[in-house]
Image (cartoon, rainbow, N blue to C red):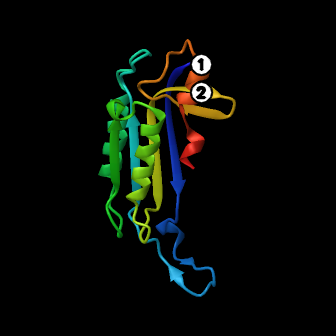
Amino acid sequence: YIQRVTATVCVLGASTNMGPLKDRRGDLDVWPRGPPLRALCFGINDYDNHDSLPNCERDAAAIAEEVRSLSDGRNGKCVAKLLGGRHLKNKEAMKKAVIDFVKQIDKDAPPRMVLISFSGHGIQDGADILLIPSAASSAEHPDNLKVEGFSHNELF
């Protein structure tokens, strides 16, 4: 059955409190070069075929605001991008948002942590958590939702 879900995926990189890291040869000290945190926050209030969830976009905005308020690291500012339901109509739009977000990460100075947060409808299919886009089929067609939902596994 469909339910409200708030899901967060955090990918950890190097942390400054770990001290310098060694390269593969073990002979160079390498400090993390990127900002402390980069976040992508999804929130969907209004669905075409499901009950509205009045606080999801506000939840996503609060997470983005909190990330932006964090102390800047010595290597950059914490960054958060916020996307609401009108940008998240289908699985392809959700996937494109994640790909675009990842492409914006500086490969020479990646952040120490990447966070992707979703607040909206979701379903669980076995071990898979499916995030439901705003124009997805109704819950009366659960097999369609399994195809239309954006799996948390696709984030990796």
Query: As shown in the figure, which amino acid type bears the numbered disc 1?
Result: Pro
Describe the element under mark 2 as helix, strand or loop: helix
Residue 93 in the image: state x and y as whole percent: 42, 38
Quick check: 101 left or right of 145? left
Residue 155 in the image: state x and y as whole percent: 54, 46
Residue occupying image coordinates x 34% and y 31%: 57
| Mark drawn on residue 142 | 1
The quadrant where residue 107 appears = bottom left
Q: Which residue lies furthest to the top in this view?
A: 140
The quadrant where residue 63 appears = top left
Residue 59 in the image: state x and y as whole percent: 37, 33
> Where 147 falls versus 107 (above or below)?
above
Q: Which of 109 and 135 is in front in this view?
A: 135
Q: Nearer the viewer, residue 91 or 105?
A: 91
Which residue is denoted by mark 2 in the rendering? 146
Position of the N terminus by quadrant: top right
Residue occupying image coordinates x 53% and y 29%: 148
| Mark drawn on residue 92 | none
Query: As shown in the figure, which amino acid type bears the numbered disc 2?
Result: Lys
Describe the element under mark 1 as helix, strand or loop: helix
Labels 1 and 2 touching (C-beta < 8 A): yes
